Image (cartoon, helix red, strand yellow):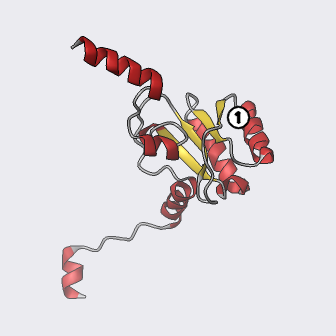
């Protein structure tokens, strides 16, 4: 039994602590999907409207923290650092993240506990809100009016 503990200690020193869901953590800039309020891809980071939506989310969740992908351009990093400073939000630049395409995650608004947001993509989240606002509820017809019309 002492050998097992010693081997675990040596393995931990050699390989680091074992990680839970390393692929998920790699995708979500070192955190878990369940801790994310909203995400922006590298492409969405250039959109002014998406930035305004991000500011709304920051105001909704003042305990949130921005995670900025360290692989995006320095000008985008500076813009989002300024955005975080203006809105009194903590931020971290994640240097070990990768940008494989324009659809890779560039910015996340996260917390240190599970929030389980159903939709975290900023464009999807706000397009569904606008669609709900624009549709008028249909007037319900009574059972008899359906039968006799």
**Left or right: 128, with 8 as reference point:** right
Residue 42 percent location from the top left of the image:
65, 54
Residue 16 percent location from the top left of the image:
46, 26
Residue 133 percent location from the top left of the image:
52, 60
Q: Secondary structure at mark 1?
A: helix
Residue 119 percent location from the top left of the image:
45, 51
Residue drawn at 76 percent across, 48 percent down: 73
**Left or right: 145, with 8 as reference point:** left
The residue nearer to you, when weighing 79 against 5, is 5
The residue nearer to you, when weighing 67 against 116, is 67
Give the residue furthest to the top. Answer: 2
- According to the picture, the residue beneath numbered tag 1 turns out to be 84
**Left or right: 68, with 23 as reference point:** right
Total count of labels: 1
- The image quadrant of residue 87 is top right
Residue drawn at 54 percent across, 45 percent down: 38
Residue drawn at 58 percent across, 30 percent down: 62
Q: For the residue carrying disc 1, how many other residues have a C-alpha within 10 Å: few (<14), some (14-19), or many (20+)?
A: some
Q: Quadrant of the C terminus?
A: bottom left
Q: Is residue 136 above or below residue 119?
A: below
Q: Is residue 103 above or below residue 58?
A: below
């Amino acid at each position: 039994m002492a050998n097992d503990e010693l081997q675990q200690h040596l393995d931990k020193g050699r390989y680091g602590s074992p990680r839970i869901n390393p692929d998920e953590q790699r995708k979500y800039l070192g955190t878990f999907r369940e801790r994310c309020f909203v995400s922006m891809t590298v492409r969405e980071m250039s959109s002014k409207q998406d930035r305004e939506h991000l500011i709304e989310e920051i105001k909704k969740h003042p305990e949130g923290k921005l995670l900025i992908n360290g692989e995006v351009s320095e000008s985008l990093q500076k813009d989002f650092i300024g955005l975080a400073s203006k809105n009194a939000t903590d931020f971290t630049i994640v240097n070990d993240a990768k940008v494989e395409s324009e659809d890779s995650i560039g910015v996340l608004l996260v917390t240190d506990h599970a929030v389980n947001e159903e939709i975290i993509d900023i464009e999807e989240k706000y397009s569904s809100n606008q669609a709900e606002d624009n549709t008028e509820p249909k007037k319900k017809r009574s059972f008899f009016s359906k039968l006799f019309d």
